[in-house]
Amino acid sequence: MHTTVHLLADVPPQMLPARSMMAFTLVTHIILVPLGVALPLITLIMHGYGLRRGDATALLLARRWSAVMAVQFAIGVVTGTVLSFEFGLLWPGMMGRWGDVFGLGFGVEGWGFFLEAVLIAIYLYGWRRLPSRTHFLLALPLPFTALLGAFGILAANSWMNTPRGFSLDSAGNPVAVNVRKAIFTPMFGPEYWHFVVAMFVTAGYVTAGVYAVGWLRGRRDRYHRLGFTIPFTLAAVFTPIQFMLGDSIARQVFHKQPVKFAAMEIVWKTDTHVPEYLFGRLHPDGTISGGIKIPQLDSILAGFRPDTKVTGLTSVAADDRPTATQATITHFAFDTMVGIGSLLLLLALWYGVMWLWRRRLPASPWFFRGAACAGVASVVAVECGWITTEVGRQPWIVYQYMRVAEAVTPTRAPALWTMFGLVIVVYVFVFGSFLVILLKMRTQWRLADEAATAERTAAAPETETPYGPRSTLRPGSAPGPSASGEDRP
């Protein structure tokens, strides 16, 4: 009890609003990140398929997804800019002291955003205005620029988890910065690939989920089949890879951040033959209530042997480790992420077995119900992954070098709460506008499809593609005008 009171007394009053604002903006921004990182690749796969097969439906899907990509990117720039400002406004202690060491990552992210914006603009402009091959080739760098932005932000975050690439002078300030070591820290590789593959998986399931809902509602045409199959196949291929990467990064945390691993698995005392708890709540006295206890499993998962020694939270002083509440939050987030990943793996295996065995989609409506839910579930898993990473590192903002309380702004709490309220209002407006735009685009596209279907039924078979008449759909050919003279969405 005395320790708890002591810890609470050391927390500045502005910590709660600063943390709340940062958590809110991170949680909302990360909803957009999977589409920002992976939708360019998914769109180009569909685009390339359409060009190779001369498939007007695939090209139409690629064109529409490129419009969604542009809107999402614009919203993501807004929310990402807010996050960038918050680093300086809410955590000036960290940026002032350590910005010269790890700030290059944010610079790389900025260049990635800039290049991606230029390429998206060219890609959107190119439909019907550039030869088909030229248009496609100009868009090929898009997925790499998206990965460049992820490279920058993951380099900064991995440095916060395993800081390297500097020495400290007599005043405790970083000197002799080695940029290469500051970027390529021990956790960079595991974090980066785990994150990137998570983005591919999530974006694939989110995109496919839209068409799974349409399939369940009776829209069994080629448009919905193709719109479901390509992104879902991408996600299904990456799901088992992500499962293995997740196991690998958990083992890296076990070796390089043992106290965070103890929070993830709510291990109180260092020991061997440590049990695994599925969920469960850690109390300040080290007892655990609720959950499902599996004897020795945690040691086996960590080191492949039941006698593997697992470091406990009590291996460090109370003010150098997450509190019992923070450890419980970390543990719940980690278990939720693993649970969702396991369910997605089963869904991917169901899809893979049916496709390899019978070369068709599963016929069961339960499969499509699962696919419709997979998008939301994968976003939740991504959110839980970030909660595990950030809450499990507490009380450090720079692991073992600077505490969160040392980095927080001196701005008074009432002003921060007011700022937080304004941020919520702005975000409600921004995300509300995003949803309205998407729904309006969906309505326009559906009306255009219905009109095109009626026209084909009454007249000749379809001859139009997003590059003009089907007869002109050849690699490198110039786009032709539509039969009606209009650029139909």
Image: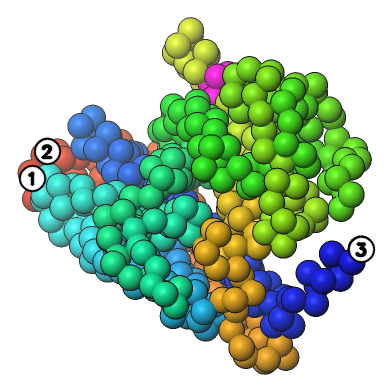
Q: Which residue appears at 55% of the width and 41% of the height?
A: 253
At label 2, the amino acid type is Arg
Task: Estimate the spatial distance between the alpha carbons at disc 2 and disc 3, rounded to whole Å.
Answer: 75 Å
User: How much space separates mark 1 and mark 3, taking CA atoms?
Assistant: 76 Å
Query: By what rule are the colours in the image chosen?
Result: rainbow
Residue visible at 68% across and 91% down in the picture = 412
Residue 226 lies in quadrant: top left
Which amino acid type is marked by label 1?
Ser
Who's the residue at 90% across and 38% down the image? Answer: 290
Q: Secondary structure at mark 2?
A: loop
Q: Is residue 406 magenta?
A: no
Q: Mark 2 — residue?
A: 474
Residue 435 shows in the view: no
Q: Position of residue 488 (x, y in %)?
A: 32, 57
Assess disc 3: are there few (<14), some (14-19) or many (≥20) residues with their C-alpha within 10 Å of its C-alpha: few
- In front of the other: label 2 or label 3? 3
Magenta range is 346-351
The verdict on residue 348 being magenta is: yes
Question: Please, is residue 269 above or below residue 441 in the view?
Answer: above
Which circle marks residue 477 in the picture? Answer: 1
Whether the residues at callouts 1 and 2 have beta carbons within 8 Å, the answer is: yes
| Tag of residue 72 | none
Residue linked to disc 3 = 1
Q: Residues within 10 Å of mark 2 (few under 14, many from 20)?
A: some
